[in-house]
Image (tube, coloured by chain):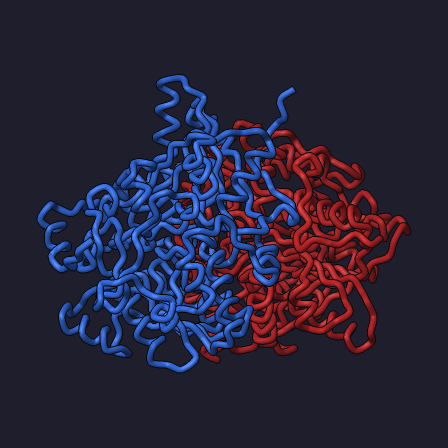
Chain colours: A blue, B red
Amino acid sequence: MKTEIPYKIYLSEEELPKNWINLRAFMDKKPAPLLNPQTQKPMTEEELSQVFCNELVKQELDDYSPYIPIPTEIRDFYKMYRPAPLIRAYCLEKQLNTPAKIYYKFEGNNTSGSHKLNSAIAQAYYAKKQGLTGVTTETGAGQWGTALSMACSYFGLDCNVYMVKVSYEQKPFRREVMRTYGAKVTPSPSNTTEVGKRILQQFPGTSGSLGCAISEAVEASLSKEGYRYVLGSVLNQVLLHQSVIGLETKAALDKYGVKADIIIGCAGGGSNLGGLIAPFMAEKLQGKADYKFIAVEPASCPTLTRGVYAYDYCDTGKVCPLAKMYTLGSGFIPSANHAGGLRYHGMTTTLSELYHQGLMEARAVEQTEVFKAAEQFARIEGILPAPESSHAIRVAIDEALKCKETGEEKTIVFGLTGTGYFDMVAYEKFHDGKMQDYVPSEEDLQKGLIGLPKIKE
Amino acid sequence: MKTEIPYKIYLSEEELPKNWINLRAFMDKKPAPLLNPQTQKPMTEEELSQVFCNELVKQELDDYSPYIPIPTEIRDFYKMYRPAPLIRAYCLEKQLNTPAKIYYKFEGNNTSGSHKLNSAIAQAYYAKKQGLTGVTTETGAGQWGTALSMACSYFGLDCNVYMVKVSYEQKPFRREVMRTYGAKVTPSPSNTTEVGKRILQQFPGTSGSLGCAISEAVEASLSKEGYRYVLGSVLNQVLLHQSVIGLETKAALDKYGVKADIIIGCAGGGSNLGGLIAPFMAEKLQGKADYKFIAVEPASCPTLTRGVYAYDYCDTGKVCPLAKMYTLGSGFIPSANHAGGLRYHGMTTTLSELYHQGLMEARAVEQTEVFKAAEQFARIEGILPAPESSHAIRVAIDEALKCKETGEEKTIVFGLTGTGYFDMVAYEKFHDGKMQDYVPSEEDLQKGLIGLPKIKE
């Protein structure tokens, strides 16, 4: 007898993972270490601890522990909105008339509206444990900033958010949600930091970028006693915390004896995708199972598909360590694509290395196609997706339509990272036919790479 | 051994109710019937069928069937976002340091952001089944309009929404969500209907009211072949559909052997409260159990606490049947209170009658106190509540604080009807100290009642 699979698979709170999985521990060839931009030597624990919380630095540098326990305090917070449902897209399958089985892990069922809360609460917890007063950070689409304000409010920490100016202007209500949770929000670049002033002088009227905002937030954390900087993506520690997504997804599939064939996620800095694929990729690396992984990025910021694999600055102001990653250059300022969370010039080192080894594919998609998929999905599956998440929906639909042609009954799993309630300006443009696609020319890409540091490896 | 109660009680999809419960069937003294404003005689099935879908008219007039089966198609849609979680507010309890146990039924985990979807999908289903082309409706806060657009998009029906002007202006993004689902949205009062034109002439510059918008939507449905009018609250049929909230809540509590003492809900037209209390009130009416029920309304629109119990028009334009209800008068236009969903001058007949019989209490609260509760709740429980829902939070907190004084371990259950993502203008006013309380004077109330019809009962 075949068990019928419900629309939504909810794990019980006891089934909430007790450990995060550390994907790097399963890699033979590890991601390249972060380098000190002055000495070009690997960043030490001591150096990193000036910027980041101590425990998070340990996690950042840990290439060998396969599992790291989730502290009880974090699990208790997780229980307020997790386990997140794994949803069978029965209605979408029917509409597409595809033999493929489509599942999505929905991370939008919390007020921050996205998966970002999984790492925000962990980072706030370690900051509190260390006795800090507060944290600083940047936010693009606003999802990370919202998540961090929620986490800080829960633990009673100050929260200072530098928000990329274009998002700040497109999403005025995001600021109010953050204020509801007690955060201070500054549009970036701003005049509150030296690096912000410098960028404003160099590029007057710039709409900002994640790279700029990171520089400002790092500077702000260094100039205040009892503060550290926290980051919502790119770092190893963030991928570690986000592995709760993949672990729950795998547990839910295993419960019903379902084996995924294709796993799809949108990729900005890589936190969602890295977290979603972690336990599956670990199996693949151990030769236990095979999966096809697809990273989806906007054609306007095509880090994996058109970037180079090299050491680069993580931020525009060049105050952060160097990371070896797929990059468009820290000087690359993407067009005002609405998927603010995907406008980062680089990609987490772990995913960069896996992609470089051919263990993962990548696809770039244009935003009008993405919004078509978003609207189709909203109408048939009910959930209004964030533009970022809709990149994954686009490719999931494309893959399901391929199955329709070939007749293959593949199981497709994708990450639905968040909701689009604060993205209605973008949806409005789409409805009014005013949305434009933008694909950088070769020349644009060359320009972005001009400032790439020369590193001897 | 005492079973530990999880943060969130999720029923399985098999435990989703198979029947709605019809509260009126359990009442000895039934709510007074709707009257034809011309003849002052009870509205007949035939008369109502000109405005409403046939099957919904049957439900509207059914005072005797205790249970009505939920069609499979509606249950299938419910499965996309139901059963909704019943959440134990462990963190809030701890913060309040109260011996009370607090639970809330969260209806915001769907894209419409509220409980309104429960009735929207039912009404769209019956309209489709009848072979109609489309439906017209009004919306206040925008939650009902969003829910109805989702439901219509699912069944392929046209959806025309008249949105109260003040909400239309305060919530521009709501319009875009409705457009995403294919709806046509018109700010009300408008020049597209005769009644709208008349109201605009009489009250130039009016910010509109639910009563006006209803009149426009009814007129629009009557003037188009293949259209019917649908309503998101007030009607018996809506309370019937919303009983899924109470049935799930009761099933979840029963599963863990928990008996509620106090049940609290916000009350605009009464759909959420009526649905939440339905199975509990049925027990109370049968003498099987006792509960204290509290309806919470804004002090700016105090229908139950300061209105009169009388036959009145349901809409400003006086095109609808007369209903016997607690009312402030169909001419009452409340101040621009931000809880748009609670700005209705009347109250569903069923709750009015139960309140009149002393089976339910009512409390009016001021909006700054409501937003204080909303922010406190958001920070500790994570969820950003809608202003409407926050009225219930306010009273739930007040009751829990009373328990702290008396030491009583009461079990408090309240309805968290929706999320506040589209209410950030109101939150901003609150943060900036610009929110004002407004309580109508006796004179204001007298003015509202001037047009009350004289009915011989």
Q: Is residue B236 visible from the viewing direction of this image?
A: no
- The x, y position of residue B396, in whole percent, is 70, 67
Q: Residue furthest left?
A: A443
* A165 and A457: which is toward the camera: A457
Residue B147 in view of the camera: yes
Residue A12 in the image: above or below residue B396:
above
Residue farthest to the top? A407
Task: From the viewer's perspective, tell me whether residue B240 is left or right of residue B192.
Answer: right
Residue ID at (53%, 27%) = B131
Residue ranking furthest to the right? B287
| Count of numbered tags | 0
Q: To which quarter of the image does residue B190 belong?
A: bottom left
Question: Observer-nearest residue: B55 or A383?
Answer: A383
- Write the residue at 65% across / 19% down: A1
Relative to B217, does residue A422 appear above or below in the rendering? Answer: below
Q: Is residue A219 left or right of residue B450?
A: left
| Residue at the image position 63 percent from the left and 33 percent from the top | B54
Residue A99, x across and y down, in percent: 45, 21
> Is residue B412 depicted above or below B218 in this figure?
below
Q: Position of residue B158 (x, y in %)?
A: 45, 37
Residue A371, quarter of the rendered image: top left
Placement of A369 over or under B6, stated as above or below: above
Q: Quadrant of residue A320?
A: bottom left
Q: Nearer the viewer, residue B122 or A452?
A: A452
